[in-house]
Image: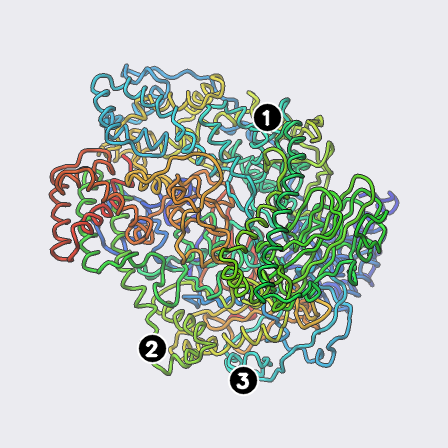
Amino acid sequence: MKKRTKSDFCGNVNRREFLHTVGGGFPALALTGLLGSEGFFKELKGATTSAVTPLASRPPMIRGKAKSVIFLFMYGGPSHIDTFDYKPGMYGMDGKTIEVKTFGRGGKKNEGRIVEPKWKFKPYGECGKYVSDLFPHVGSCVDDIAFVHSMTADSPIHGSALLMMNSGSLISGHPSLGSWVNYGLGSVNENLPGYVVMLDQSGGPISGAKNWTSGFMPASYQGTVFRSQGNPILNLQHVDGMAAGEQRMLIDSLNHLNAGHLSPRFDNTNLSARISSYELAYRMQATAPEAIAVEEESEETKALYGMDRKETEDFGRKCLLARRLVERGTRFIQIYSGGAHNDHNWDAHGDLEDNHNLHAGATDKPIAGLLKDLKRRGMLEDTLVVWGGEFGRQPTAEYEKGTGRDHNSYGFTMWMAGGGIKGGVSVGQTDELGAMAVDNRFHVKNLHATILSLMGLDPNELSFFFGGLDHKLVGVEGADPIREVMT
Amino acid sequence: MTQPSSVLTIALFTVCLMTNGVAEVDEAGLTFYREKVYPVLQTNCFKCHGGGDELKGDFRLTSRAGLLHGGHYGSAYDADDPASSVLLEMISYKDADHQMPPKGKLPDEARLVLAHWMEMGAPYDPALEINGKAVERRGFTVTGEDREWWAYRPVSKEAPPKVADPVWGQNGIDAFVRAQLDREGLTPNPPAAPEVLVRRLYYDLIGLPPTPDEVEAFASASEKDAEAACRSTIEELLARPQYGEKWARHWLDLVRYAESNGFERDNPKPHIWRYRDYVIDSFNSNKPYDQFVIEQIAGDEIAVPTKESLIATGYHRLMQWDDEPADREQHVYDVLADNVQITSETFLATSLGCARCHDHKADPVSQKDYYAFMAFFRGVTHYKTEGTILNWASPEEKANFEKEQKSKIASLEGARSALAGEIKTIMEKAGLLGAASDAEVAPLIDDARGAGSEWSYTTVKPDDDWRDIAYVNKSWFKGMSGFGAANPPGSVIRTEWKTPEIWMRTSFGLKALPESLILDIHHDEDVEVYLNGTRIFEAKGFTTKYKTIVLPKSALDVLQTGRNSVAVYCRQTGGGQYIDLSLRTAAGATGSVESLLSGPGSKRFIDQVRETAGRDLVAELRKLDEDLANRRKASAGMPINAVTEAGPVPGPMHIHQRGSAHAPGDEVKPGLPAVLASKSSDPRFLEASPVRHEERITSGRRLELAKWIVDPANPLTARVMVNRLWQHHFGRGIAPSTSDFGHLGEKPTHPELLDWLATQFREGGWDMKAMHRLILLSNTYRMSSEPESANLEKDPRNLNFWRVDMRRLTAEELRDSILAVSGSLNLKSHGEWVFPPLPAEVLATASRPGEGWPVSKDTEDHFRRSLYVHVKRSLRHQMLADFDQADTDTSCAVRFATTVPTQALTMLNSSFVNEQARIFAKRMRESGGDVRAQIADGLQVALQRPARPEELDHLTAFYESLQRDASLTPVQALDRVALLTLNLNEFIYLD
């Protein structure tokens, strides 16, 4: 397949011209896409000559295996040595003070008291991967999973680390991963958002909407917050309720008057784009509730996701909903495990055991259910599942007493499955304590490069011109994907 | 690099031998390289350093020349001391910021090989060397051609051309535009109809629609004299306060105005709204643009700073700011870099930001230019959570305040203590309170009356971040509380403190978050207490005994499980001195009144108080607590969140290699970009003189920069600003990329016109209103927007301005217009930001749902213009964001105008639009007449033109069918007509 160059990425319009004229030109371009794929008011296309279509589907830049991403974001930072990064040498060392470099919210330290892993590990699957007792169900899927144990990030502080994991930068204002994917590929189903975010019941993550912002890109690429119950999208239903028939009458009448307004302004594609946007909105009102109707799934499926048990019901519903959205063409779905502050998420500064039992307990079964369900439906091949938080946790105690661990961005674990990922593989290592990645280290940018590559986007070519610079998710210096985990 | 010349000679000699491959080449060295070194380098290093397509860090390791030349960190080989070679330091992994290879530390064996190789003099086998062009770093020169770029050339003084059509010869704008149209064979559109033009004028000048009466008045005046009608309407609109509000919004987009810091806490920026008001006032008072520029950049350094000019410097405080950055030093420069970028883009339309890591790839701007420019801001103090506040007050105001403050606090404390006593008595009488004591509460930090606590402390002023959570204070002393000298009343001194000031830190652990927090404090004059970096208490004056303060909820909110840090600052001026405090949580059940009021189960106790006393004494007590807290915080005069500098001489400014503060290169002085201000390829370095105003001393550097920006010799400033004025009247700038006049921007379509306007602007005294008049009175502006086939064919994008382009209302104009036509709009101007209600779904996306968005109590505030809605970085107003309000983290010169289905959902279904539709419908009903007349009235209000009969036929039929087919009441049906009207394309688009 021919590698597409930057200059023709946006179709036949010079990309800078495209961006500088967006003030007036963007909706016109959007319209062409809407018209092209929808066939609405085709006769009204008028003088439009451009072919750039921000929301419509575009072919990938390079060969990619995945069509959708489900990013399971373990907000707060799960402890890698208590979950997937087995450190047998640490058992029996509890309470020992050792020299080790750490950097967390408590600052930089040179020594600390070891808190040994609080759960037992055992081997799973054909690959024999050791997984802790926190994740027995995920353990049963290890042959489909590639673990990256040598992840590093630039910040051990939630605010900036979340921004880095979501947008590749410690400073906000940059588009998030899901925005890049939708910018690069467009949306397959215009009746549903291409980028969906599902938050924890306790609240959003620190910095809220900055984590799914489109930054300097148009707002059309920002994540849409989706609720798993009730009204999935803000303003999807009329505030006081309005019957479909009544709304149809309203839109028909509106269309009639708008058509009258358009007729002497036939060349203005913004106007016709706006007319068709009402038809899309009308259809979205039918499509979105149907997408979240997980009740129609079989009892067996619901149980597979843990929806039959109180502690796993919520996350299970979101995972199942994610599968349904993938089936309907949503490109990028992010589900947060944990929200708000302190023990509402994986941020185990106080009691490690209470915290991780709670959050692993709520997610283990649903995550395994998602992987198994995708697999049996043949969807895992082109759905990339990513698991991890904004960083990991330290091997030592944060405070004089207790088991709480501080943040650790020097080394942590993330895993991926499906969508062009090799199963049963582990890449990279942390030291014997899990304090620091020492072998085959990877940066968040490498993870992003991997995700984009698997989606068929060249991480070092996919760019957006803004403020005098061709911005890339992986930064101006570029980054390689983690080839060791790719098929 | 300095090296003894003999060593250098030897090194060069070795190279000679090696590269020539003649004479006595050290065979052992070659073999060692081939067999031991090469495999290590090839596997681990060559991909990025000369063996592949890229050359990271400008460093080539595949040849000896490359090794010796080195990269960003200088030569990688140190002949003088091979063991200290940069290459060996990089692979040692000792410095966390400089580690190679990045994927992981090399095995010991490989590192020994490389160390040995360095000791041997780093021999290469020439046969295995890969040489390439990129060994030398690209030199930076500014060429004559660079200086000839249109934006850097002096502004041309060319007079407007002669045109045949006399109507188009009066106004210079028309002459330039018409000449180009004639050249291109295009015909200008005829003038727009009066009702079209008046709507355009209103929106372009005040961002609001005209009323039907105003439209009618304009139309009839136009019939008599179109130009005079236009002229008087323009004057009238320029004089309205709403003009400044509309144009302030354009400016605020450029300076990425926001009212909170972003990141984890996303705290508000105190008083920063005064900057927004300053911008409004500047437009309304038609402040000359040069003054507007100088005040924002250096309003504190001008000859006579005023309240306004100090407020203007809030410009430097608008950026995002992380109170807990991963890398403190780097973040200090991130903030400066943000301000450099905004300043260069806003005033100069130059994207300097691209030269932070390396010389600009497209424009003639070097990294040296960049850091020389940054040096203008080097003295600016780093931002703080509570803002960098200057108080504006006269000396008398200050003295009066101090006097008043003391007596007010005393009287509030008296009232509080009496009320607490009353509660105690009442409850004891009722048998609901035992004689319990404070001893039952659990201390987090004990004070000296008990066991005391260990604190770290210093008496030498520490760095600004001393109060932050992660501050590490290795060199501080340790001591047990209390701290003081000369035994003032009530003191228990365990550690001597005799200096005027003390800074103290300690910490405590928490397994779970408590429901209350009580501070006992005995302090000298002026104390500040910080919890996890946030100020939770401050007081002026001294105490003579321990005082108990129940801390407000905001203090509880900053607590976290695990480690919590407490930082205290105290100062004293004379006499005995003392500082000591404890923090505790209430124990519950049978505690004192204070602990029962805030501990677990407090709700029951509070209910009991209310029932027993017959009125809500606790609410009264809390009110007093709040008053006291506010009073203690108060200071004389008006607080202004302004720029501050630490002194006359800022620290050194180095070039940062690859943009990293940890890789300082050469030092640079403040200077202006070479291509604009200097004859050489080096920046024009400037000397600044320190400026002193009262107790404030600054470097004077920003003033130098500001003066240069408005200097007549600067070719950019006037061009940039007139181009922006043009942009917001015509939908695009004459140079369309209004913040990028560089090679990556789009060139002007009418360069001579741009220069002519720039000259008018500057020579006319930087008069912005005069430029509006000039533009708006032109025939060019007054053309219709209609499509004309022949022109469309030749110039479909209207690059030549043969018509005026239609435009969509901006997010703010849309919301304001909905409020205006419904009659709800509250035109109150200025003042603190407001919080209109947001949907619960939006609030739920915050990490503290509902917090940071306390809906304004006065509902009238919900209907203020959108400009006054609080701009919180992590929680945006959903409707405004959906309609492409500018992002607040980067400068926005041209907004997007997207059309997506979620906008339609908002306009059809949201509670805001439907509520306004109901109010609008009510207004229609009240206008009288039958339904047809009511609808006619509504359409006229919304579209600013009389309704047409066929529209009325259609909407009346719609109104009736809603009742017939959808069983709506007449009232509901008219609500829907109103809703439909607000959704019309004609409502949201201007001709």
Q: Residues within 10 Å of mark 3 (few under 14, many from 20)?
A: some
B587 and A69: which is toward the camera: B587
Q: Secondary structure at mark 1?
A: loop
Residue B470, x across and y down, in percent: 69, 56
Question: Mark 3 and mark 1, same subunit?
Answer: no
Q: Residues under labels 3 and 2: Cα distance?
A: 28 Å
B119 and B356: which is toward the camera: B356
Mark 2 near mark 1, Cβ–Cβ under 8 Å?
Answer: no
Q: Is residue B19 visible?
A: no
Quadrant location, the N terminus of chain B: top right
Residue B211, x across and y down, in percent: 27, 32
Q: Residues within 10 Å of mark 2 (few under 14, many from 20)?
A: few
Q: Which residue is mark 1?
A: B306
Q: Residues within 10 Å of mark 1 (few under 14, many from 20)?
A: some
Residue A181, x across and y down, in percent: 44, 58
Question: Of the residues shown, which amino acid type is indicated by label 3?
Answer: Gly
Residue A107, x across and y down, in percent: 70, 58
Question: Mark 2 and mark 1, same subunit?
Answer: no
Looking at the image, is mark 3 or mark 2 earlier in the sequence?
3
Q: Mark number for residue A123?
A: none
Image quarter of residue B315: top right
Q: Which residue is mark 2?
A: A297
Q: Residues under labels 3 and 1: Cα distance?
A: 74 Å
B164 and B777: which is toward the camera: B777
Please state the chain letter of the residue tagged with numbered disc 2 in the rendered image. A
Quadrant location, the C terminus of chain B: top left
